[in-house]
């Protein structure tokens, strides 16, 4: 009953009911299926959201297209001011929003709150960015000519996001895309629709208070059909997709067919290398967070661990001891480090993964079991010992399974780091400057995120986030990622009164 009370207090604080409309484009609606959100720790229904159908999406895209025309004429720093108000509104609700993420997605409360904090951080960043969307002035080879780059908004950005970061991924896209002058249409994962509705309510209130079109922050909840609708529709100038490599491949092909733009954040299969000169304490603590945090459901979760042969045995012992201390349970209880998996089918995938490890010559060094006796979707954080090239090691299993592999020299470990299809995040633990710089250089890691002496997960918003190869090549969040949400125009202005041609061509 205390769990039921937490749910109702949280929903109330966010203006949600047990039944909610899941479409927003200036007005709330929804004519699609009603989808129930289930607490993955208890199996209880938290609430329901009526999703969008095809005609809801059509209408939402129509409204978003109109709203984009208004929004693009608002000066960028003024757009930043609106994002600042949204940031403040999110900050006021950080506690209930973090709780809702814990209830609906299943991550532990500090991580749920951390996700909202991440949205707040990127909003701060975007406010500053709104005064720095600078182009370049380029020297022209022609006299009396001036060349420059001008960045203009794209129009409508479709954001399709995954269940595992139901707030932060939208936040990265929304805050940056908004200061860039676009309207956004968001489709989150259907199983985290309450969170999508709660966030959109906060943003809608700010837009409406400022007499701006609500459709600047549109929401069209739904499943694969609505995602496909967004990918296919020419009115969506950029599709920012976060999810699995398999679905991302389909989305990319659909968007490419109509020459739309795509930003892909797909699966990872991240490794940590611990060399023989590493700070072992630091490495053990890092791996614990990276492999077990979010119950292994981060795109940046550490799934492969390469240990130098000289430290291998003692390291495994330390790790087994550390795993033994992890408390598994309800993500809202303090002291719990490992919550449930998001769905029942994720538990099946975990068990399939463990069976494959055994079939492919691997051993279980810790855990290995689903906790089927508990009401929620719990599994034991697991450590295996297996060959670097076993097929199961090359697959992203979205669960806390850590494969450990012994290596003799660091070149070999780097090669193994790079041999998988995915290319998201990677870390090396060493105290040698030579090895650090080699790791970030041309013969080092091939990933988009290359760390030294910190885990593979837990990125800051200031850097560009994303990965190479089957991770999709997209970059979100900081650095120059904003450029993907705008179109670059090369402008040449002739003030000479003459017509000199480039490359000295005479045409007369
Ligand atoms: P998923 O691919 O199943 O779903 C992602 C989104 O795509 C959901 O909103 C889903 O409804 C939608 N979708 C499903 N079928 C679709 C289709 N045919 N067309 C368009 N949209 C469709 O992924 P998931 O299980 O929700 O999330 C886990 C995956 O996301 C993991 O692979 C993880 O690594 C990845 N991920 C990557 C990043 C990153 O930044 N690289 C971040 C978070 C998660």
Image: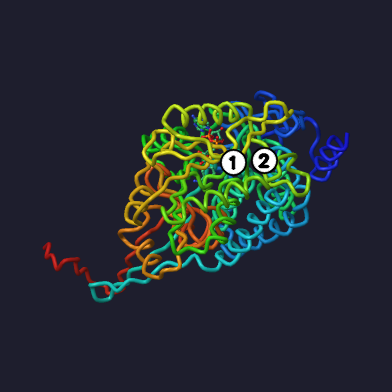
Q: CA distance from mark 1 to mark 2?
A: 8 Å
Which residue occupies 45% across, 61% down? 480
Left or right: 136 in relation to 334: left
Task: Please rate how many residues cluster around mark 1, counting C-alpha atoms within 10 Å: few if below 14, some from 14 to 19, many from 20.
Answer: many
From the top left corner, tell me how far across and down residue 30 is, in percent.
68, 29
* Mark 1 or mark 2: whose residue is earlier in sequence: 1
Residue 337 visible in the displayed image: yes
- Label 2 crowd bin: few (<14), some (14–19), many (20+), radius 10 Å: many
Badges 1 and 2: C-beta atoms under 8 Å apart?
yes
Q: Secondary structure at mark 1?
A: strand
Quadrant (top left, top right, bottom left, bottom right) of the N terminus: top right
- Numbered circles on residues, count: 2
Q: Is residue 46 left or right of residue 471?
A: right
Locate residue 428, reporting x and y percent: 45, 58
The image shows residue 36, relative to residue 80, as above or below, that is above
> What residue is rendered at 19% in x and 66% in y?
501
Which one is in front, 447 or 437?
437
Residue in front for this viewpoint, 270 or 408:
408
Question: Does residue 238 appear in the picture of this structure?
Answer: no
**Which element is circle 2 on?**
helix
**Vertical relation: 21 (above or below) 151:** above
Give residue 57's quadrant in the image: top right
Q: Which residue is mark 2?
A: 196
Horizontally, residue 267 falls left or right of residue 435, namely right
Please tell me the numbered disc located at residue 186: 1
């Amino acid at each position: 009953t205390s769990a039921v009370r937490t749910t109702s207090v949280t929903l109330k604080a966010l203006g949600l009911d047990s039944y909610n409309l899941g479409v927003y484009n200036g007005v709330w609606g929804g004519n699609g299926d009603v989808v129930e959100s289930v607490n993955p720790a208890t199996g209880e229904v938290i609430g329901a959201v009526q999703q969008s159908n095809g005609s809801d999406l059509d209408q939402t895209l129509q409204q978003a297209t109109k709203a984009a025309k208004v929004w693009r004429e608002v000066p960028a720093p003024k757009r930043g001011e609106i994002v600042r108000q949204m940031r403040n509104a999110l900050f006021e609700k950080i506690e209930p929003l973090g709780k809702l993420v814990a209830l609906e997605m299943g991550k532990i409360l500090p991580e749920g709150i951390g996700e909202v904090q991440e949205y707040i951080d990127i909003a701060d960043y975007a406010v500053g960015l709104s005064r720095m969307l600078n182009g370049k002035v380029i020297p022209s080879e022609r006299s009396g000519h001036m060349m420059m780059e001008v960045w203009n908004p794209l129009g409508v950005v479709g954001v399709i996001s995954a269940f595992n970061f139901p707030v932060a991924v939208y936040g990265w896209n929304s805050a940056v895309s908004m200061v860039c002058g676009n309207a956004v249409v968001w489709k989150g994962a259907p199983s985290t629709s309450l969170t999508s509705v709660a966030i959109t309510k906060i943003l809608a209130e700010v837009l409406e208070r400022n007499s701006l079109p609500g459709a600047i922050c549109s929401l069209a909840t739904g499943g694969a059909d609505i995602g496909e609708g967004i990918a296919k529709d020419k009115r969506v100038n950029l599709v920012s997709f976060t999810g699995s490599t398999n679905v991302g491949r389909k989305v990319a092909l659909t968007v490419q067919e109509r020459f739309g733009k795509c930003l892909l954040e797909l699966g990872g299969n991240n490794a940590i290398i611990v060399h023989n000169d590493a700070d072992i304490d630091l490495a053990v603590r890092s791996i614990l967070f990276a492999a077990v945090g979010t119950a292994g459901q981060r795109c940046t979760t550490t799934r492969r661990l390469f240990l130098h042969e000289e430290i291998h045995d003692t390291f495994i012992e330390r790790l087994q001891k550390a795993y033994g201390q992890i408390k598994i349970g309800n993500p809202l209880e303090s002291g719990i480090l490992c919550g449930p998996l998001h769905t029942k089918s994720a538990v099946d995938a975990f068990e399939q993964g463990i069976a494959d490890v055994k079939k492919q010559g691997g051993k279980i060094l810790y855990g290995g079991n689903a906790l089927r006796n508990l009401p929620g979707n719990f599994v034991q954080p697991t450590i295996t010992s297996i060959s670097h090239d076993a097929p199961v090691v090359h697959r992203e299993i979205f669960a806390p399974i850590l494969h450990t592999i012994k290596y003799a020299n660091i070149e070999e470990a780097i090669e193994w780091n790079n041999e998988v299809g995915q290319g998201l995040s990677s870390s090396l633990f060493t105290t040698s400057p030579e090895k650090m710089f080699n790791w970030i250089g041309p013969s080092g890691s091939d990933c988009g995120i290359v760390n030294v002496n910190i885990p593979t997960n837990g990125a800051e918003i200031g850097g560009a986030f994303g990965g190479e190869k089957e991770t999709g090549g997209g970059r979100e969040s900081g650095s120059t990622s904003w450029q993907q949400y705008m179109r670059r125009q090369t402008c040449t202005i002739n003030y000479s009164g003459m017509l000199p041609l480039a490359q000295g061509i005479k045409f007369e």
